[in-house]
Amino acid sequence: MPMNIAIDGPVGAGKSSIADRVAERLNILHLDTGAMYRAMALHMIRNRVNMQDEQAIAAACEEADVQVRYEDGAQKTLLGDEDVTGLLRSGEVSAAASAVSRCPIVRERMVRAQRELAARFDMLIDGRDIGTNVLINAPVKIYLTAAAEERARRRYAQQVEKGDMTPYEKVLADLNMRDEQDMNRKINPLCRAEDAVLLDSTEMSIEQVVDAIIKVVEGTYGKRN
């Protein structure tokens, strides 16, 4: 069976960047499920879909062609033939992704694709409901979190690097709103799986977090050659 690792946690916890490094050290693929939902959200934005209208989201979902490809081990997220990887981290897309991810039809479609990939490849998958829904039998589950203020600081720094000067206070408010939405949605809310290892990265460097996850993986799978 393929090696499957599930990492869940709230927005801004650093899941994607940390998962990239863990997957690289283990020489396995990393599937960023958030990028899949963000690509779907970008499709909705481009088509001016009302994010409060679940039926409209469901209908537009049928027209969206979200794909995942890998180049030299790096994930590329596509809408049709367009690589939209570099367009998915804006505040607008983040907010839309939270609304889109609450739609049952969207979630069913994304989860099906994620499970199919995990059944074929050694893979680390990160998201909001990987250990509790997508890969409920994954031998390794991590719940990665950090204090809201620290997560907002990290997100603010990332956005500034890209020229997005949204004030820190707005970033924090948006993050708290996203947490509320993710943790209280009716379908597969964000929560820690009972068998997930809790990892609070508030006072940890990226390398410390990576090392901690590798230690958990090696405790289950043994050391990788």
Image (tube, grey):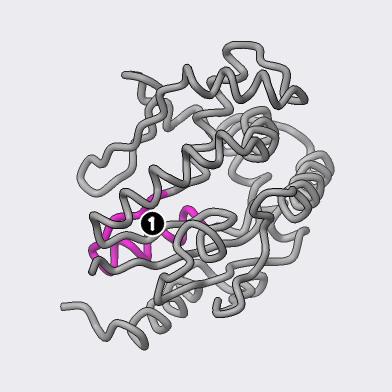
- Location of residue 37 with respect to 131 vertically, above or below: above
Q: What residue is at 46 percent from the left and 61 percent from the top?
A: 18
Nearer-the-camera pick, 204 or 220:
220
- Within 10 angstroms of label 1, few (less than 14), some, or many (20 or more) residues? many
State whether the magenta stretch is mostly helix, strand or loop: helix
Look at the image and give the residue range highlighted in magenta. 15-31
Q: What residue is at 68 percent from the left and 44 percent from the top?
A: 156
- Give the left or right position of residue 135, taking residue 186 as reference: left
In the rendered image, which quarter is residue 14 located in? Answer: bottom right
- State the image coordinates of residue 6 (x, y, percent, origin top left): 46, 65
Please say whether residue 225 is one of the residues in the magenta stretch: no
- The residue where tag 1 is placed is 20
Quadrant location of the C terminus in the rendered image? bottom left
- State the image coordinates of residue 81 (x, y, percent, origin top left): 31, 19
- Name the amino acid type tagged 1: Asp
Nearer-the-camera pick, 131 or 17:
131
- State the image coordinates of residue 7 (x, y, percent, origin top left): 50, 64
